Image (spheres, helix red, strand yellow):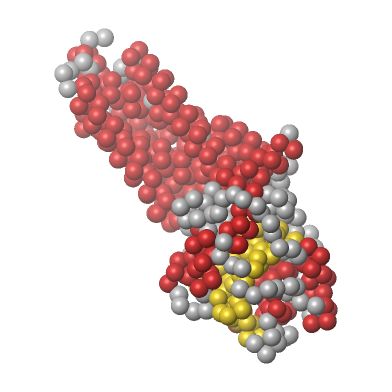
Amino acid sequence: MTAAAVRGAGASTWFLRVFVFGTGTAVMAVEFGAERLMEPFFGSSQLVWASLIGLILLALAIGYEVGGRLADRWPHALTLGYITLASAVFIALLPLLAQPLLGAMVAGLLGTPAGVVLSSLFGTLLLFMPPVAALGVASPFAIRLAAAGDATSGQRAGSLYAFSTLGSLVGTFLPAFWTIPTFGVRATFWLAAGLLILLGLAMARSWRLGFLALLPLVLPFAVSPLLKPLPGLIGEWETPYQFAEVYRLPHGETALSVNDAAGIQSVYTRRRLTGLYYDAYLVLPFLFPQSQTVRTLLIGMAAGTIPTMLERDVVPYRKVSVTGVEIDPQLVALGRRYFHLRPAAAKVVNADGRVFLETSRRRYDLMIVDAYSQEIYIPFYLTTREFFALCQEHLSDGGILALNVNAVSGHAALLQAIERTALAVFPHVYVARAPGLYNRLIVASERPLAPPAAQNLPPYLRAVAGRLRRTWRMPRPGSGIVLTDDRAPVETLTDQMILERLRELL
């Protein structure tokens, strides 16, 4: 085909710029929407997020290669328009397809890291690669239509890539800061699909397919709530930070999970003890004199399990005041609605825990760090030497820092790295097994510590304190990395534990 014929079959340069801007926006909207769509089923761990990004990039690479070949064979705007419309329809249907398909894959697999990794890869492949690959066709196709052999083809190609990248920039910020928090993940898909339908119709100049523009308007009425098939599920809420699920456990307890429901972030029971690692924290106020009011700071409050238990079960024996720091205000609201979190239990601060410490001058007798992001990772900046030094500055004389760490064994590299880092700041550091499958309690102070004697505890806490006493030890992590703000591979060390478990299961 001659250059003139290609130009006649194409579109104006300005329209092509608008077109690639819109497709670039849609690609990033789909990527961010895909991450949020998968979170209720697989969580948002680094492994899942990496698999999603990797397969999206693979889909784009396939689209670029196929798009270049198609553009050379059929260099017509009509072809590109129809491909765009097909991608738009697929994207519009994604919220309909996600729940049954992802729900079927996750059934029976969610409890293992192997299942999370393999299922997320398979789910991404099935759901998100086809429309993203189709959108990858847009850039090489648009360059072919725009260039058509003229002397400024390089300039035109550069301009189109620039507009496509600017569209991706908009597609990065718009879902993250506006459409997902304001309208939700499914509406974000439908907005992207609507944009692509309009671009595809304009490119193909085939307005007889205009009825497709109704898809994003009618599909919301055909989609049921995006709830994972979880026994006892009460409800699910999409917050600016995560998906939150509240459900009943078999023995009547109320539980909160974020993103994957494979772990519990908060629990409420009418009994005094949960049987989980929270119980170990109830022993710590008894390390202080009975007459002292134990000023407590809790970083990572979630729905308020710890302050609720302290107020209900410890305050009758020890004076405790709690300041709870939680970055997600929706979790606090759920705590008040479902987990009996009373205003008297804690003074609540909605903030990032470290930012709060950086801006606060108050000192505390007891500091508890129980913050996790992406349900399995401790935020790296809450494990570093600088963070522990900041905690030390905010502890009163004789104050205690306590940290919950998930570790598959006492020799796990993550646990040893945190032990080593704490020892670089505090003269006295201890580790003990807390109730729960993988939970370790790290305790640090300027003074020597030991679990309180049984006779100094209320009867209901004596078994928990006995477990702590039996496993209480001074760590000897040996040589190795001390975590710092400059270098703290917490995610990598956590992934190593997951991969170790993965090898054991395969």
Number of labelled discs? 0
Residue at the farthest left position: 151
Nearest the viewer among 151 and 206 is 151
Decide: is 453 above or below 438.
below
Nearest the viewer among 472 and 434 is 472
Decide: is 376 above or below 311.
above
What residue is shown at x 79% (from left), y 82% (from top)? 456
Left or right: residue 74 versus residue 34 is left
What residue is shown at x 23% (from left), y 31% (from top)? 159
Residue 353 in the image: x percent, y percent?
51, 66
Q: Quadrant of the N terminus?
A: top left
Nearest the viewer among 163 and 11 is 163
Left or right: residue 161 versus residue 278 is left
Q: Quadrant of residue 99?
A: top right
Residue 226 in the image: x percent, y percent?
58, 49
Nearest the viewer among 167 and 391 is 391
What residue is shown at x 54% (from left), y 37% (from top)? 51
Residue 238 in the image: x percent, y percent?
53, 56
Residue at the farthest bottom position: 291
Q: Quadrant of the C terminus?
A: top right
Can I make out residue 207 in this image? no
Can I make out residue 149 in this image? yes
What residue is shown at x 76% (from left), y 77% (from top)? 452
Left or right: residue 405 versus residue 325 is right
